[in-house]
Image (cartoon, grey):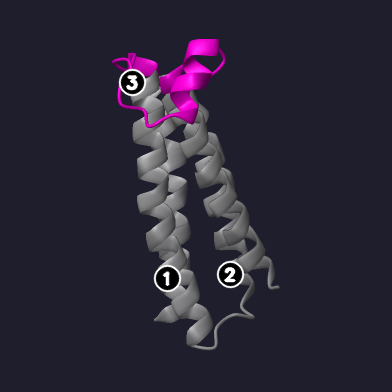
Amino acid sequence: MNTDLSWLAASAILAWVMLLVASLWRARAWTPAGMTLAFGNRDNLPEPSPAVARADRAAKNMLESLLLFAVLLLAAHAAGKGAEPRLAQAAQLFFWSRLAYAPLYWLGITYLRTLAWLGGIVAMVMVLGSLL
């Protein structure tokens, strides 16, 4: 597997972890009642705290960004650009930016969070540049 596709797979795993954290945090799965709720249909979830709501928004934003990045990266591969080092750099930048983004968003650190988010956008532009 190419380096960029390995980073894309790592980003997909990161998205899953972010979704899992948001879900388990909301259900308070570390408690017996929360674990029961997490394993159930989640019909009676408690109202999210501000931090839990941020974790949920961060996970959803990751899914949105990952979809766009994956489409661009796979389009670059379909166009025969898969060997370009820029793609591996972009995929690595995307992963590390999004990894930094998650805890920054969870903690409510606004400006640094936006800077980490921007790293993901720069990664998308790098891939787009290889397509043009």
Q: Is residue 104 visible?
A: no
Q: Is residue 41 magenta?
A: yes
Task: Assign a secondary structure to mark 3.
Answer: loop
- Pick the quarter of the image with the N terminus: bottom right
- Residue 126 image offset from top left, x and y in percent: 47, 65
Point out the frontmost of discs 1 and 3: 3
| Residue 61 falls left or right of residue 8 | left
In this rendering, the answer to whether 114 lies above or below 92 is: above
* Mark 2 burial class by Cα count in 10 Å: few <14, some 14-19, many 20+: some
Q: Nearer the viewer, residue 107 or 87?
A: 107
Q: Please, what is the three-letter code of the amino acid marked with disc 2?
A: Arg
| Disc number lying in front (2 or 3) | 3
User: Is 71 part of what is drawn in magenta?
Assistant: no
Residue at the image point whose x is 49% and y is 29% from the top: 39
Are the residues flagged by discs 1 and 2 in contact, CB closer than 8 Å?
no
- The residue beneath circle 2 is 86
Q: Position of residue 65 (x, y in %)?
A: 39, 53
In the picture of the structure, the residue carrying the numbered disc 3 is 45
Q: CA distance from mark 1 to mark 3?
A: 36 Å
Q: Can the viewer see residue 12 in this picture?
A: yes
- Of the residues under marks 2 and 3, which one precedes in the sequence? 3
Inter-mark Cα distance, 1 to 2: 13 Å
Quarter location, residue 86: bottom right
Report x, y in % for residue 24.
Answer: 49, 26
Tag 1's secondary structure? Answer: helix
Q: Which residues are magenta?
A: 25-51
Q: Residue at x 52, y 44 (%)?
A: 16
Q: Residue at point 41% right, 39% down?
A: 59
- Residue with the mark numbered 1: 72
Q: Residues within 10 Å of mark 1 (few under 14, many from 20)?
A: some
